[in-house]
Image (cartoon, helix red, strand yellow):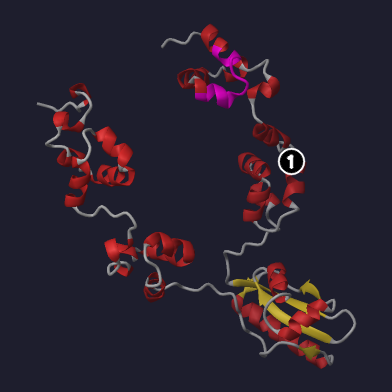
Amino acid sequence: MIWPTEKLQEAADKCKIRSEFKLRFPSAYVIARRRGILDQLFEHHPNKGRTTKRGYFDYYKNKQHCVDAANHCTTSSEFKRKFKGAYNACVKFGWLAKLTSHFYHPGNRLNRCVYIIKHPKEKIVYVGLSYFPENRFKAHSKFGIASVINLIANGGKLTILTKPLPATDAITKERQVIMKFKRYGFIILNQSVGGELGGSTRKNTIEMCRKAADECKYRGEFQRKYAGLYISARRNGWLEEIFKNHKNCGNLNAYRTIEKLQHLADKCTTRREFRLRYTSADTWCHRRKLHDHLFRNHKNLGYIKLAYMPKTNA
């Protein structure tokens, strides 16, 4: 269909926003976008046909607004989750590195800060290491050593002594801080002399993945219950190995044999019916290019009309 500018304008006037224009008149939208006249077509629409999401982006074109948003966050993931418009604006205008320079980067778990939790009046202190002291402080208030939980309940406050340091330097610094407080007569709540890194990254092994997989009937259950182990198994190519003794190799709806697929295909008169009735089986066949084999004995090879059959080179 030919879309002169007049017809494009008529189509745009029937829509309130650009996304509606894109859904109702997809070809017109593509043409208008290629010609660069979308702004012209929606010139008289409220907010030029943009949704509130675009309004948020326009708001964050002001760098100070992005600075204010970044100051409410401590990590990049939190910034992206809570202030997506500000995050996108920072990426587009090149502000991200500068505005997030004060963020913690928990992914680098070899670096740790030295922190203390100190009683406001008495000489009681706990010294620790963590790559994210604020989160560790929250965890201390609920779990772990009972004496530290009581310390926090009685008004113990968190103080971060150092910036993130390499593990070796952080251990040395923590032990120095513990010795310093001992010289001043403080009661140290640490159960060790210092140097316990804690929170280190656990390396998932195939044995750990296999043990967890044995507790699950199929792969979907394994993914829901043990997301981290599932990701490790998938990345390392262990899924087939750890599920080799499960029914259908751990697949809930497995179509692993030609006989099963052929049985399903024989119940259908066309490929379209097969796709609608057995979606997962159709997807399985599509990935392995099995349709021609399964529908070799069907009328028109399973196509609704002979004209739909793909052309082959003679």
Q: In which quarter of the image is residue 176?
A: bottom right
Residue 72 location (% of width, % of height): 75, 53
By secondary structure, the bulk of the magenta-drawn segment is best described as: helix
In depth, the one of 293 and 297 nearer the eye is 297
User: In this view, which residue lies farthest toward the front?
Assistant: 267
| Residue at image point 46% right, 73% down | 203
Give, as a three-letter code, the residue at label 1: Lys
Q: In which quarter of the image is the N terminus?
A: top left
In depth, the one of 13 and 303 nearer the eye is 303
Q: Quadrant of the C terminus?
A: top left
In depth, the one of 214 and 12 nearer the eye is 214
| Residue at image point 66% right, 73% down | 130
The magenta segment is 11-23
Is 17 in the magenta?
A: yes
Is 145 in the magenta?
A: no
User: In this view, which residue lies farthest toward the right?
Assistant: 121
Q: In which quarter of the image is residue 297?
A: top left
Residue 29 location (% of width, % of height): 51, 20
92 lies above or below 309: below
Residue 313 location (% of width, % of height): 13, 27
In depth, the one of 96 and 224 nearer the eye is 224
Residue highlighted by disc 1:
63
Q: In which quarter of the image is residue 84?
A: top right
